Amino acid sequence: MHPAYSVILFTTASGAGYGLLALLSLGGLMGLTPLHPWMGFTGFLTAFVLITAGLLSSTFHLGHPERSWRAFSQWRSSWLSREGVAAVLTYAPAGLFGLAWFLGETAHWAWSLAGWAGIVCAIATVYCTGMIYASLKTIRQWYTPLVAPIYVLMAAATGALLLNLLLVLFGALAAWALWLAVGALAVAFLAKIAYWFSIDNARKTYTAESATGLGRFGKVRPLDAPHSRANFIMREMGYAVGRKHSRILRRLAVILLFAVPLISTSIMIAYIDGALLPLALLATVSAGIGVAIERWLFFAEASHVAMLFYGNERA
């Protein structure tokens, strides 16, 4: 599949924003994070900017962005529609809890309820994003139960790194936040390795014979090309990344998304009273670049069954 940069920006930026929103709210509700008004303001503003920028960028690859509002009407059957509804719903409770944090009113049960509702909506939105892809039977690399959990884990990992950076800036860094980032990164790494192993070793069950229903007659091959020149399907669904380049980019994603942040965060745990801002910045920026590479590969390595009609033997 052709990697659309607007969708890569959407899934990475909004994922980190929802992760930060959920973890910051959780820390405030559990009494783990100091309820400093300006720290809450900065944290929630950063989360909302990332979320909003991501959501807006998701419309850039549409032929008619002005019609995107129609997606909200299909929430009964469409994960895309459910994602949109959940994304919009998140703003209200999360915004109310952020306002309560800034005003110092979080002790009231109503504000606490808003905080928990914001956490649930944020997680649900990221899960729905993952399910948009995991529900597509026509793409073998996406139609797997690992996809949606990985989206949630990536959001948690990048959000935890942003939370650590925020806590460092306000002099409120705590061991629990560092260990949370380490745990989220480690689990996300294991899940991603399992995903890569799964798609590399899965049987390619989609064939030209099964696609045409002519398998009972033997080997199927096209007599003529469906089109005389490249078309939309070939450009968007026929994009393929070479195996050599895929291996290099996977290693780069592992280094930037997992290794560098894990090492930086581990050093921060060992020297929690030191000057930690450069390490927190390094971990956050490295993970941001790494998750963009990981997400690009997620699209580039996917093969659509439509390409069976354009010469591919298996998908």
Image: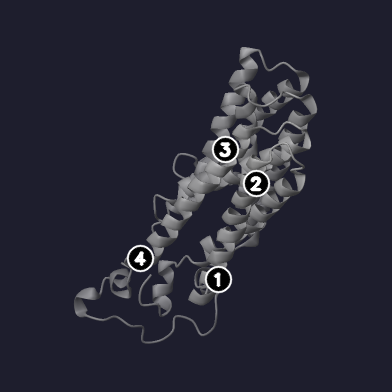
Depth check: 80 or 48 in front? 48
Q: Are marks 4 and 2 in contact (CB under 8 Å)?
A: no
- Give the number of the mark in front: 4 or 3: 3
Q: Amino acid at mark 3?
A: Leu
Q: Which residue is mark 4?
A: 201
Q: Which residue is mark 1?
A: 248
Residue most extreme to the right: 38
Report the Cα–Cα distance between label 3 and label 1: 29 Å
Report the Cα–Cα distance between label 4 and label 2: 36 Å
Q: How many marks?
A: 4
Q: Which residue is mark 2?
A: 267
Q: Secondary structure at mark 2?
A: helix
Give the mark, 4 or 2, whose residue is nearer the N terminus. 4
Tell me the quarter of the picture where residue 208 sits: bottom left
Q: Secondary structure at mark 1?
A: helix
Q: Which mark is residue 304?
A: none
Above or below — where is 161 with respect to 175? below
Q: Amino acid at mark 1?
A: Ile
Q: Which residue is mark 3?
A: 180
Q: Is residue 233 left or right of residue 260?
A: left
